[in-house]
Amino acid sequence: MSITAEQLNRVMPSAADLLSDEPEMESELHYLQLMALYSSLARYWRERSDYFIGANLTVYYSREQLRSRDFRGPDLFVVTGVEKRTRNSWVVWEEGGRYPDLIIELLSDSTAEIDRTIKRDLYAGRFRTPEYFWFSPQTAEFAGFQLTGGSYQEIPADDRGWRWSGVLNLYLGIKDQQLRYFTREGDLVPTPDEAADRLAAKLRELGINPDEI
């Protein structure tokens, strides 16, 4: 018998007691990659109020998971159609039964096999997450999958090696050894620092010193 989100909410602990249980990023490369993905998407969607971006946060989804302490926290995940607010973790039964719409895992020597197998099966079978991508900041291994008929099918890369995300309405592709977002027109989605540098350069072209503004 299936259980509704409301029924699950009544029998599960409060989200206030469930903090994220994720380890630190494995290397500086992983940390910088995660920050680039998080900050550029948050800036790109700065006018929106209907999404949540989780960075290295635990996703709590079942009583069995809590009992076994089998915690699974994607490196980055996106949920659309939800209230934009700060969360200590993603608690499915507190969010109307919502799971991530998109997940990105950053491969490392210690996690790559799990990301390619156990987590892939979990995200397809239990989470039913429509899109799953992984990327290695060390080797630039990059793959993307779309949920089709209950299993993941690879998203084909275009001639630039980019893969389209219908969830984000953006491409994901590699630039300067980092995984980045690109618009349909092919423009890089900048981080806040990159956007500030662009603005400063434009002001200098106009003969304006940005440091004096």
Image (spheres, rainbow, N blue to C red):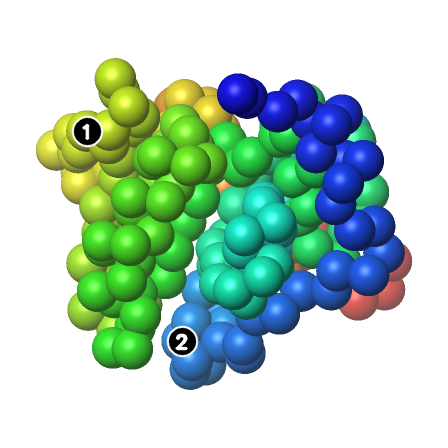
Q: Quick check: 206 above or below 18? A: above
Identity of the residue drawn at 42% across and 36% down: 126
Horizontal relation, residue 159 to residue 102: left or right? left
Is residue 103 or residue 36 the one in the foreground? 103
Residue 177 visible in this rendered orientation of the protein: no
- Earlier in the chain: of badge 1 and badge 2, it is 2
Q: Amino acid at mark 2?
A: Leu
Q: Quick check: 193 above or below 171? A: below
Where is mark 2, residue-wise? 29
Horizontal relation, residue 133 to residue 104: left or right? left
The C terminus lies in quadrant:
bottom right
Binning the other alpha carbons within 10 Å of mark 1 as few (below 14), some (14 to 19) or many (20 upward) gives: some
Q: Amino acid at mark 1?
A: Gln
Quarter of the image for residue 16 reads bottom right
Where is mark 1, residue-wise? 153
Q: Position of residue 50 (x, y in %)?
A: 73, 27
**Foreground: disc 1 or disc 2:** 1
Identity of the residue drawn at 58% across and 46% down: 62
Q: Position of residue 147 (x, y in %)?
A: 31, 26
Q: Position of residue 113 (x, y in %)?
A: 21, 64
Q: Whole-Å distance between the Cαs marked 1 and 2? A: 28 Å
* Label pair 1/2, CB-CB below 8 angstroms: no
